[in-house]
Amino acid sequence: MASASYHISNLLEKMTSSDKDFRFMATNDLMTELQKDSIKLDDDSERKVVRMILKLLEDKNGEVQNLAVKCCLLPQLTSPRLAVRKRTIMALGHLVMSCGNLVFIDLIEHLLTELGRNDNMSTTRTYIQCTAAISRQAGHRIGEYLEKIIPLVVKFCNVDDDELREYCIQAFESFVRRCPKEVYPHVPTVISICLRYLTYDPNYNFDDEDEDDNAMDAEQNDEDYQGSDDEYSDDDDMSWKVRRAAAKCLDAVVSTRHEMLPEFYRSVSPALVCRFKEREENVKADVFHAYLSLLKQTRPAQSWLADPDAMEQGETPLTMLQSQVPMIVKALHKQLKEKSVKTRQCCFNMLTELVNVLPGALTQHIPVLIPGIIFSLNDKSSSSNLKIDALACLHVIMVTHPAHAFHAHVPALVPPVVACVGDPFYKITSEALLVTQQLVKASDSFDPSPYINDLFTCTIKRLKAADIDQEVKERAISCMGQIICNLGDRLPTELPGTLLIFLERLKNEITRLTTVKALTLIAGSPLKIDLRPVLPDAVPILASFLRKNQRALKLCTLAALDILLRNYSSAVTPVMVDAVLAELPPLISESDMHVSQMALSFLSTLAVTHPSSLGQLSSGNILQQLIALVRSPLLQGGALAAMLDFYQALVATETPGLGYMDLLRMLTGPVYSQSAALPHKQAYCSIAKCVAALTRACPTEGPAKVICSHSIRLLALLSLGEVGHHVDLSSQPELKTVILDAFSSSSEEVKSAASYALGSIAVGNLPEYLPFVLQEISSSKRQYLLLHSLKEIISSASVSGLKPYVESVWSLLLKHCECQEEGTRNVVAECLGKLTLIDPETLLPRLKGYLLSGSSYARSSVVTAVKFTISDQPQPIDPLLKNCIGKNIDYGSLVTNTLLDSVLPQLYNETKVRKELIREVEMGPFKHTVDDGLDLRKAAFECMYTLLDSCLDRIDIFTFLNHVEDGLKDHYDIKMLTFLMLARLSSLCPSAVLQRLDRLVEPLRATCTTKVKANSVKQEFEKQDELKRSAMRAVVALLTIPEAEKSPLMSEFQSQISSNQELAAIFDSIQRDSSSANMESMDTS
């Protein structure tokens, strides 16, 4: 023993040598010594050996590291003690995340050799477990070895050993989750094995008669389904573990292979539904979870699956699921009467997810399901969580299905739901109140008389209680609001007292927002509930809410005040109105357009119901705020529409000091006063729209102003255009001359306004103005501006009005589609595209025919025109477009999912650098390289970025990453795009990015460490700085992926960043920005 200790001491000393060969040989000798049966070490020597081996695991030399692993861990995989093997597997799992490549390769080769040898079943099980553990911890590294590993695992699945089968299927699960790309060819094999062992139950024979009985009979005897606890069970039976592993593996497959959904509904779905009868509760829970995952995978893809064009293709996942609903309900019906609480919870979760994916799918099956839900609500053995899930399920079903489907079941539903409202556990009460509210909503379609008293009594009890949970308080208020809204006329004696409770809740900071919403609901009720007793107190309180620093409260309060004005104008006194008006000025501001819009809507309603109250506007702050808002460049959309409505309502009141000319002077004052021009062109457009709104409201009025300055001319032209859109101005013969004269202005803004005005005026009278515009385009030299007028006409005029002119417009446009001026060609293309939408069946084939034109300009115009035929909304042209989008596609407009498979290869092809498009240009003594293919590559990469938002579930992410990787080494513009894509991909599909991390890090490192030549121009330094920042943003995004830091290359790059002062500063700055953005988004949500 002493000589052995002495020999090992010598070896330990050599292991500290600076010579790597000495360390290698000493470690090799130590391994030989430790494998001898005769070796015995004292405690001190053991500690020294362990410390030294752990030190060598971090040796700079890969071969020494490798030996240390062999010496320390690999022999323990065959230890006679299973606990030691288990800990060794855990240690190896943690090691492979950060060990060098040589160590990893050697470890995998060792496992493959031992699995191929298969000396005994016990060690084979250990090696399979070890392989699965490595895959779980370092899936991105083991992927390339799966071609060798999977056939071995498949072979061991056929060995008659349940424990080995369980470990093999667990290994498949880890491969599926961690190596999605490499496992793809083997997925059918994995599914086949899982489906075989999902039903593997050699010790039990299910009664086939269960499959044939009348399961859909709602009155069926329940006793048959309550005996699962007493069924046969064998303590030595391990088959349930195999079935559980199979269910979990199928869960992994359906969660990660979205593109195989149709196949899953053909093979996996029926198999899982059949196994809802599983006798082991834990296995059954995993089967349900796997089906839940299948439903969740179907849910996010609804947008394209539910698309009518997608339906044309035949079976889609949604239609396949729809056809399987009867089978699912039949299987769940049996389980809803099981004694097992866990099983029934799984059923309710399943039903909830099913109706979220397919709203209305259970309409025919409500009679079968309601008894099962009521059974769980009444069953004394039900847990609180089960009741909560049952109520939540019932609520979702009621929300997503027509009310008439529940009529027959209301008498049976009300008693258990009312009992749940009175339950002492607040979460049950809260869910029950939601169901009660839904029952009340549906009461319009059945006679609620027998249930009103019960529903009101249980709700009022919760509404009055002060010492209850916040959620219950809010839902009691909402529920009572619904009761009064729908049934208030049947509660004459209870109503006054209930409204007083609402008034109290309105004064409470915690419940005020919910109460405002409830009052809005009641005020909008068709029953015309008498709110007069509470209005004198309620309106001043509501007015005070407008100054609170709570945006949601302001918005809801404005909505409530608006509906109160509309429906209770006689009860709203001038004093109440003044209290509200005093709070409005700060709300009308560009800082929050939605609040401004709601405030303007309130003022418009006020102009109709209380016109006399508007007199104070002329001297108050509200009008000043309105004028300031009109001049804001941010005014658009709903807020602008509300502004126009208000001006029309205001001028119609004929309030002194607020007549047509008064308001016109206020709006146009700054322009006509010859003071400084308005800061933004949008302000002129907004003022013009307001002028037009006033003019339409007062057609007999008309401003008489002399057009002189640029600003006045601009405003006048825009105003003419806005008025002309809605009013026929053909009675003004000088208009054509005035507008054509403006085409010669020195100001580009005036020219653009004149072009817009001519187009807009033509919309008001097409027969008068459209032939004039076409004639001018043919004879004039101002074609670009006139074509813009034509574009406005095509965009805004009615289809019926334009149809008689389609042929003449079409032929005119074709004459100009070969124009050498790109700007003109673009306008022509937009006109052609929008004109095609008027008669797509006739015009689209013509447009397609010009793709064969010998002129590249004509072909370019046609492709651009197609872009303008594509819309976010369904159009009659959509089916026709499918045949046209292909080789000549404009990649920036690729929105058609059905063509993705054929178009993607062409798109990827355009991301490649084409040498034949690169040329050298001599600029004096210098040579400059020009890449004519850059714009096309940039468009292709922009389209790829768009695909991440719209079609991620339908692309092969690894092929996609190949092209992103190439883009990281491309031109400045392409790099900037691919850095953005990389950051996006890090959050969308982290596991795929992790697998490619080593290949992605290198180009990022190259960008960050590139130095600009000292004699370069300033722009080159700025571009390189921007590239560095953008690359560093991508790095920060990559580091959010779990385990990214464990990549040796990423770890090395991080060290490089830390040691470089400039890079470290950029990195820290981006990290701070990103963390503050996350905090901000949390606050907003």
Image: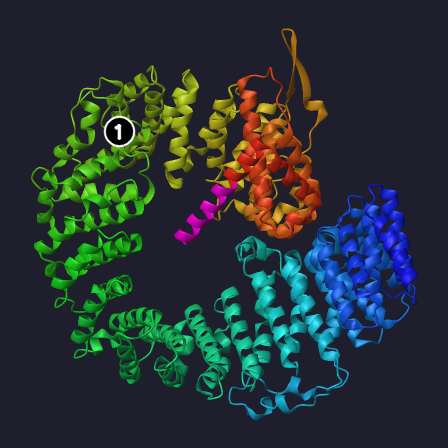
Instruction: Provide residue 1003's location: percent of width, then percent of height.
Output: 67, 35
Q: Main secondary structure of the magenta part?
A: helix
| Residue closest to the eye, 379 or 830 | 379
Residue 863 appears anywhere in the view: no
- Residue at the top extreme, as displayed: 924
Q: Is residue 626 left or right of residue 14?
A: left
Q: Is residue 39 left or right of residue 862?
A: right
Figure quadrant of residue 179: bottom right
Query: Quick one: quadrant of the C terminus?
Result: bottom left
Q: Is residue 889 left or right of residue 504?
A: right
What residue sits 27% from the left and 80% below the top? 461
Q: Secondary structure at mark 1?
A: helix
| Residue closest to the eye, 453 or 769 | 453
Residue pointed to by mark 1: 720
Examine the rendered structure and indicate whether residue 613 appears above or below residue 733: below
Instruction: Provide residue 1010's location: percent of width, then percent of height.
Output: 64, 27
Whether residue 1073 is in magenta: the answer is yes
Figure quadrant of residue 247: bottom right
User: Please, what is the three-letter code of the amino acid marked with disc 1?
Assistant: Leu
Instruction: Provide residue 254's location: percent of width, then percent of height.
Output: 65, 63
Whether residue 622 is in magenta: the answer is no
What residue sits 60% from the left and 40% below the top? 884
Figure quadrant of residue 190: bottom right
| Residue closest to the eye, 557 or 1021 | 1021
Q: Which residues are magenta?
A: 1071-1085
Instruction: Provide residue 840's location: percent of width, then percent of height.
Output: 51, 41
